[in-house]
Each structure stands twice: as structure tokens, then as C-alpha cells.
Image (cartoon, grey):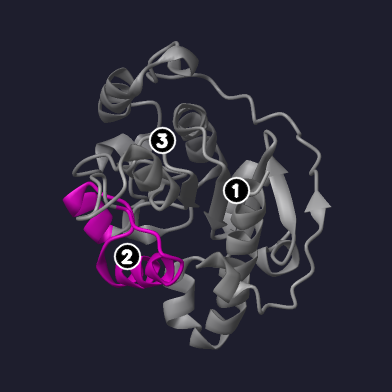
Amino acid sequence: MAGALLGSDVPVQTIEPPMAPAPVVPRGDRPAGVEAMDWQTLRQAVADCTACKLCSGRRQTVFGVGHLRAHWMVVGEAPGEQEDIQGEPFVGKSGQLLDNMLRALGLSRRETPPPGGEGSAYDAARQVYIANTLKCRPPGNRNPEPDELAQCEPFLIRQIALVQPRIILAMGRFAVQSLLRSNEPVGRLRGRVHRYQGVPLIVTYHPAYLLRNPEDKARAWDDLCLAAETAAGLAGD
């Protein structure tokens, strides 16, 4: 499938961003020891977290969904209204668009093997794990604030460590800037292969942005082609 996606002329250039330290903020009521938690403990820690003011307005936390050892990991920004209601990232119209984007690459967010699948190895290679940078919805879908991102960051870092993805697709400004420690806009960072803790990371637009700006869908497709090309190269190593 990846071979059919290599028509993009986007240059492949590995960029190692400067990894500036995360903002130092008081821990508040976030449970200690996040860096050593297993999946069950981490999920409960997120559900119980009251480390920032977003906890007071949420219906529920939005932890993540997908194969727990998927080769692909998608990182988004913050939950919206439907995510807050359903407790799953990327639902509603933006989720439908993301599913279509993944399907074009032969990928799925399903947690169980597809009918006729080839076992767990096939399952992990063709599925994704999806998580947001923030686990609680900002009121009115406003932009995340720096202290909110900083308080939630250890949860995402641990999710990435547990999944051990082979490639990361960062979608949207806040996901990109958090993972790459960069203030550059998405448009300037896309089209190259970055690295997060040694893992190839591809930058692209958030599906919600693409719904508002459909003229950029072609650029997003180029990003998906670059991600597929990069993943295919890893599979051949």
C-alpha cells in the first residue's frame, strides 16, 4: 500500500529539533510516578487528575484509543465537545475525516484484529493508537493554556513510552509544538521528517482545521504520503 503513496515530491529530510526542557510548574493534584505506570494505572490517574482547572468543567477525561502496541501513533490537540461526551479522541466530523485519512493508508483505530487478519503482528502494523495532548476539554474549545499543557504532558509522554510507536503523526499546532518544543507554525514544520526521542515524527494539519480550510487537504495528503514512505522505509530496515 505504501508504494502507491510515494508519488509525493516532498523532500525527506531528518531534523533533530532542540529539546528544550518542559515548563516547570507545580504538580498540583496529578498523581506522582506517572513515568512508571502501566496502562491500567495510567488510565485511572488521568481519570482522577485534578492538576489544573480543566477538571472542574469536564464530563469525563479523554484518555486514548487504539492498539496498545500500534506501529503508528496519532497525537492531536485537545478534546472537543463530542470527545468530552464520548470519552474518545477524534470523534464527530473531525474523527470521520481522520478515519478516512487513516483508511487511505490502510490503517485503522480498531483495537481488535480485522476479520481475516494475520494475528497480532499484522494488527499492530496496520493500526494506530490515538491520543490528545490534553485529556480534558478546554471550555468553549478555546486554545490550551501553557500550564494546562505542562500538567498533562507527563501522561502523553508515558502513553508514547508504553506504545513504543515506530512513527508519530502530530496533528495541529499544540500537538506539534509540545512534542517538538518549537514555536514554529505547522506550515513551516511540515514536509520534513522530525524526531521525537528518536522516533520519526511527521507534522500535519489537524482534521478540524482541514474542515475549515479544505484547500489545505492536498498538503495534508502530501504529509500522509511522507509518513507512509517513512514507515515503509522503517519496515525494510
Give the magenta range: 81-109
Amino acid identity at mark 2: Gly
Amino acid identity at mark 1: Ala
Q: Which is more toward the observer, 73 or 230?
A: 230
Sequence-first disc among 2 and 3 = 3
Measured as percent of width and height from the top left, residue 80 is found at: 32, 58
| Figure check: 224 above or below 14 | below
Gap between marks 1 and 2 measured at Cα: 27 Å
Q: Which is more toward the observer, 176 or 139?
A: 176
**Residue 52 image-quadrant placement:** top left
Residues at marks 1 and 3 touching, judged by CB atoms closer than 8 Å: no
Sequence-first disc among 1 and 3 = 3
Q: Main secondary structure of the magenta part?
A: helix
Which residue matches tag 2? 95
Sequence-first disc among 1 and 2 = 2
Measuring 75% from the left and 66% from the top, which residue is drawn there?
188
For the residue labelled by badge 2, is the local secondary structure a helix, a strand or a loop? Answer: helix
Q: Which is more toward the observer, 108 or 202?
A: 108
Measuring 65% from the left and 30% from the top, which residue is drawn there?
23
| Figure check: 203 above or below 147 | below
Which residue matches tag 1? 235
Question: Which is in the foreground here, disc 1 or disc 2?
Answer: 1
**Residue 63 image-quadrant placement:** top left
Is 22 on the left or on the right of 85, as rendered?
right
